Amino acid sequence: MNEQWPALLWIVRHGQSAGNVARDAAEAAGHVLIDVEFRDIDTPLSELGVEQSRALGRWFAKLPLHERPQVVLASPYVRARDTARLIQEEAGWRTGDDIRLRIDERLREKEFGILDRLTKHGIRAKYPELHAQRSHVGKFYFRPPGGESWCDVILRLRSLTEMMTREHAGERVLVVAHQVIVNCMRYLIENLDEEAILAIDRLGDVPNCAVTSYRRDAVSGRLGPDLVNFTAPLVREGAPVTVEPDAATAPKP
């Protein structure tokens, strides 16, 4: 591990989105397609997602000054950008004075290609050969036509982490992104392998607005786990915790 990591690193999944809600409805009804009017990049937060984001912002606002983020790195997708914006607004951070905000396309959602907007039933019905291939290969290496595998996501995140160690060494950094990004960042930071990260993935989906964080050890310079899928800020503020797959996520192996 590079000894120039940020001093504190928080990785947060966005609040519940309209896509999460639409996916649940489509799956429950046995539909082939998820009825979402927006491009995936434009899918907004649900009302509950806004509430969750604000609740998390109030938690950050209560941290001691020396424990608060100095830099926010956010996915360009609307649901992640709005989560970051609402956290910042609720915490009372002023861009430029209190915090530096950077939108980074490397934090975007995993691209699902031809499987985008399909339910589990839709994938099996429309592309049975792809469904069988994915079941055989596993989600870590399976790349749908026009989309990405987890390995592809990890490759772009390697570039992001190199940037963090170069430009944000010793700083406190908040990352706001997506479920697959949270898990792939854990894969990199914790030096996991395919078996280990998929075992974590099978334990359950990353809750919306959950916090996973790391602190840099003063002696080794390495990042050590601090919080994992921490949802207490939502519970304390009375914001319901939602644990939902992303709208285009194919079924778990």
Image (spheres, rainbow, N blue to C red):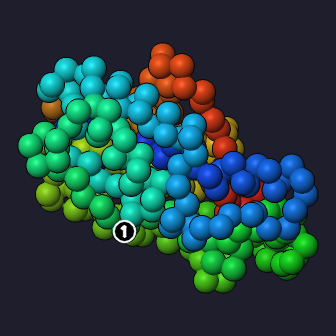
Residue 97 falls left or right of residue 78: left
Q: Is residue 248 visible?
A: yes
Q: Which quadrant of the view contains residue 112?
A: bottom right
User: Looking at the image, can residue 6 be seen?
Assistant: no
Q: Residues within 10 Å of mark 1 (few under 14, many from 20)?
A: some
Q: Residue at point 41% right, 33% down?
A: 54
Residue 122 against residue 146 in the figure, above or below: above
Up/down of 100 relative to 36, above or below: above
Across and down, in percent, residue 219 comes to: 16, 32
Q: Residue furthest top?
A: 236
Residue 226 x, y percent position in the rendering: 37, 28
Identified at 39% across, 63% down, the residue is: 76
- Determine which quarter of the picture holds residue 12: top left
What amino acid is found at the position of numbered circle 1 in the picture?
Answer: Glu
Which residue lies at the image location 23% right of the left edge and 33% below the top edge? 92
| 201 is higher (above) or lower (below) than 252 | above
Q: Residue at x 66, y 83 (%)?
A: 145
